[in-house]
Image (cartoon, rainbow, N blue to C red):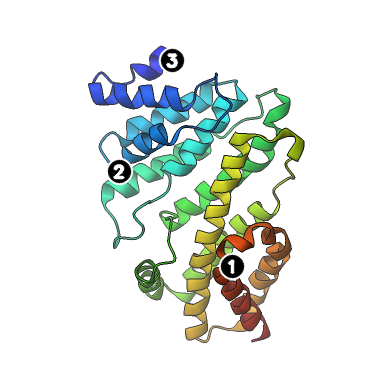
Amino acid sequence: MKLNVVHLCSSENAKTIDLALLKATTHTSHKPPSDKYVNLLQSTVDTRYGPETIAAVVERLRLTTDVCVAAKCLILLHKMSKSENGHKGEGSVVRVTNRSLIYNEGGRHLKLNDLNVDSSRFTRELYKQYLDCYFHIAEVLGTISSIKESSEDKRLESQRVSSYTTDCIFKQIGFLVALFENISARPETPTSKSNQIVIKMIELMVKDCFSVMILIKIRFEELYARKAKSDVMVPVLVRLEKCKETLSDFSWQRKYLVEDFWCLVSKLKQG
């Protein structure tokens, strides 16, 4: 299997990419993939090497029976699916095409039930289910960017959302709230068995949570400006409030964003 991955392409660049993949998903380390290799692999996604990189990660995930290797592959797919540059207009055809390969091919191969290892429970119950939802949402929205709290990022996203129909915005909010619910439903991780790979997974999910919070907030603000019917929003607002307590564990990391978000939810619910 390793030989097949390493020689996926004959070019030197492709061999460098495949070697980075093997280093990032080694059997011998119980640590998450090194940033050095993750950054290298992530940097190829928007290039002509993107399809080969994605195919190699998916193939490694599909063939492995080792839970650590599978978990590292999932972390790679998660990070590679992000648009690190935020929103730059509608984006290039290459970016959309290559990232859609992750959503389609990655999602299709998140089958971890054959990993008969006790420690795979967290991977199967949390991260696999989460990424199933994440890739589905990313496919619907086109991408889930790593949107920052900068004024420019929020302005560009608000501009995009303002061009959508009200029905489209409601649909997008419903999908984004589903991601909230998956994070909220995460199983407890035993503190006595601290696992650095699991910690990394949770760290990525928390970052997603704040990005999604910004994306939902922008859409709520647009609906509020349009004077959308509050009774249509109530079911989504109720779903969100059910997540509030379990998401409070890491709210301190973005205190003002979180406070503004829940204030807006309460305001919309009151009509």
In the figure, 207 relative to 68: above or below? Answer: below
Whether residue 132 is visible to the viewer of this picture, yes or no, is: no
Q: Disc 2 designates what residue? A: 46
Q: Disc 3 designates what residue? A: 2
The spot of residue 140 in percent (x, y) is 47, 55
> Quarter of the image holding residue 2?
top left
Q: What residue sits 56% from the left and 35% below the top?
A: 110
As rendered, which of 36 and 68 lies closer to the eye?
36
Q: What residue sits 39% from the left and 19% below the top?
A: 5
Which quarter shows the C terminus? Answer: bottom right
Q: What residue sits 27% from the left and 50% below the top?
A: 93
Left or right, residue 60 beside residue 16: right
Q: What residue sits 73% from the left and 33% below the top?
A: 193
Label 3 CA crowd tier, 10 Å (few <14, some 14–19, many 20+): few
In the rendered structure, which disc, 2 or 1, sits on the residue that comes first in sequence? 2
Q: Disc 1 designates what residue? A: 255
Label 1 CA crowd tier, 10 Å (few <14, some 14–19, many 20+): few
Q: CA distance from mark 2 to mark 1?
A: 33 Å
The spot of residue 252 in percent (x, y) is 62, 62
Cβ–Cβ below 8 Å for labels 2 and 1?
no
> Quarter of the image holding residue 113?
top right
Q: Amino acid at mark 2?
A: Asp
Q: CA distance from mark 3 to mark 2?
A: 25 Å
The spot of residue 179 in percent (x, y) is 59, 55
State the SS at label 2.
Answer: loop
State the SS at label 1.
Answer: helix
Q: CA distance from mark 3 to mark 1?
A: 45 Å
State the SS at label 3.
Answer: helix
In the rendered structure, which disc, 3 or 2, sits on the residue that comes first in sequence? 3
